[in-house]
Image (cartoon, grey):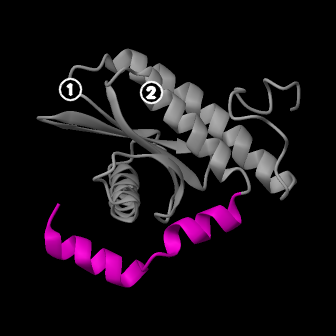
Amino acid sequence: MNKRWTQVLNQSRGNQSMQYANSRYANAEMIAATLKRMVKSANGTIMSAAAMTTDGFIIGSALRDETNQDTFAAMNASLLVLAQRTSEEVAIGELKQVMVQGSEGVMHLTHIGSDAVLAVATDPSANMGRILLETRSISVRIQEYLNAGQNDPKTEEVSPNNSGPAASGQN
């Protein structure tokens, strides 16, 4: 990423990302724990994962230490908006997902409901079929957390080891 672009983003956004997202989403810690488990269980094929608002604020993440989460979220939100506009312009219907393949990995973006997106960065050797299945499953789980947080701002009592509200018998 261009150093100047990073500076512009950081100056314009400040350090508001985590404060904004954590105050708005009661289950942000549960979402981060879910993403960390996903990255850990992938044995190195998933390098980073984050749930963010469509306007570029992190809700929960499992990013590499060297990754600036605000920049990561802002760039992915921009990519998503561009892909949505392209999808509309060429009349191919509602955008479902975005994949960017680079020489050192693949970036996969998928919607989580209407207000959030899941971004997953993978190693180039990752089995993309398996990654797509995993991101679909994780997206559903995160959507459950987001919905639960909207219904009860105090957060449902679900341990980070559970799969989510559905796993604890709550719907």
**Which residue is at 78% across, 23% downward?**
167
Foreground: 59 or 67? 67
**Which residue is at 64% across, 52% downward?**
28
The tag on residue 1 is none
From mark 1 to mark 2, how far is it between C-alphas?
17 Å
Give, as a three-letter code, the residue at label 1: Pro
Q: Main secondary structure of the magenta part?
A: helix
Hey, which quadrant is residue 130 in on the image?
Answer: top left
Estimate the x, y position of residue 117 in percent, counting from the top left. Answer: 51, 48
**Which residue is at 33% across, 50% downward?**
65
How many numbered callouts?
2
What's the magenta region?
Answer: 1-25
Residue extending farthest front:
65
Packing grade of label 2 (10 A; few <14, some 14-19, many >=20) is: some
Residue extending farthest bottom:
11
The secondary element bearing badge 2 is classed as helix
Rendered position, 167 above or below 55: above
Foreground: 115 or 105? 105
Q: Is residue 120 visible?
A: no
Q: Which numbered disc, 1 or 2, marks the residue closer to the eye?
A: 2
Q: What residue did someone put label 2 on?
A: 40
Q: Is residue 84 magenta?
A: no
Estimate the x, y position of residue 79 in percent, counting from the top left. Answer: 33, 56
Packing grade of label 1 (10 A; few <14, some 14-19, many >=20) is: some
The secondary element bearing badge 1 is classed as loop
Q: What residue did someone put label 1 on?
A: 124
